Image (spheres, coloured by chain):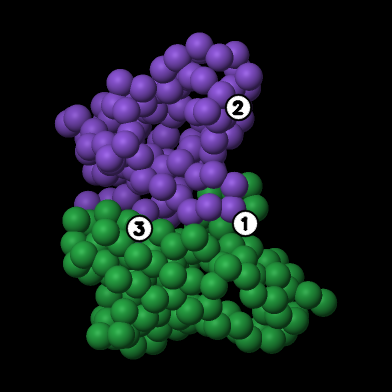
Chain colours: A purple, B green
Amino acid sequence: GAVVSQHPSWVICKSGTSVKIECRSLDFQATTMFWYRQFPKQSLMLMATSNEGSKATYEQGVEKDKFLINHASLTLSTLTVTSAHPEDSSFYICSAKRQGIQPQHFGDGTRLSIL
Amino acid sequence: GQNIDQPTEMTATEGAIVQINCTYQTSGFNGLFWYQQHAGEAPTFLSYNVLDGLEEKGRFSSFLSRSKGYSYLLLKELQMKDSASYLCAVLGGDYKLSFGAGTTVTVRA
């Protein structure tokens, strides 16, 4: 199997709050995890790639101080949206894959709404 | 940069066959994935092609032609539960996945 758990599913919070999203691979070791953002009826946009034990690689235009990523173990990566504002409201999805050319397996996503 | 094109919407009748085309122009190529995404949910993996030809997996098949930069996903014996968005994604030379905007398939009774 290849199950990825993402938590929480839904967050509603005030502007200025920091929000942490967890992504866990439940039944396999994920050497690489990815964080995506998706706007309604649009495709997934890669935000960053994280490898266990090393710093995340961010895509152009993504602020690394705004979106903090930690990949402390082979089964857990976290994304922290710091000082969130309404424009950060979106659907955030993580994925994880095994070593090598393997399919990415996605978590259920987190719907973030900043008021 | 990566350029991945697929139709926006398709409609078909229950029991029918639908073919979703995907054309791509990418920097390097390490394979093409198809994912299914139901509204409000995360994508689920359907298929992976890296060599030319047809890969069959139950009611779903995926085809690849690397020389033409072309793939299709074939859905047979359509069921109502197949109504979803289907995403074409290319693994580029940098081993990052680039997604198309998705094709929304609506299955009608």
**Which label sits in the foreground, 3 or 1?**
3
Taking the spot 36% from the left edge, 22% from the top edge, the residue there is A66
Q: Secondary structure at mark 3?
A: strand
B53 sits to left or right of A43: left
Q: Which residue is mark 1?
A: B38
Q: Which mark is residue B98?
A: 3
Identify which residue, A79 or B100, lies in the foreground. Answer: B100
* Cα separation between marks 3 and 2: 26 Å
Tag 1, which chain? B
Is the C-beta separation of discs 2 and 1 under 8 Å? no
Q: Position of residue A2 (x, y in %)?
A: 41, 52
Tag 2, which chain? A
A10 sits to left or right of B102: right
Taking the spot 41% from the left edge, 36% from the top edge, the residue there is A24
Taking the spot 78% from the left edge, 75% from the top edge, the residue there is B108
Res B103 quadrant in image? bottom right
* Cα separation between marks 2 and 1: 20 Å
Q: Which residue is mark 2?
A: A113
The answer to whether tags 3 and 2 share a subunit is no
Q: Position of residue B22 (x, y in %)?
A: 44, 75
Q: Earlier in the sequence, mark 3 or mark 1?
A: 1
The kind of residue tagged 1 is His
Task: Name the image quarter holding the C terminus of chain B.
Answer: bottom right
Can you say whether B96 is above or below A8 in the image?
A: below
The kind of residue tagged 3 is Ser
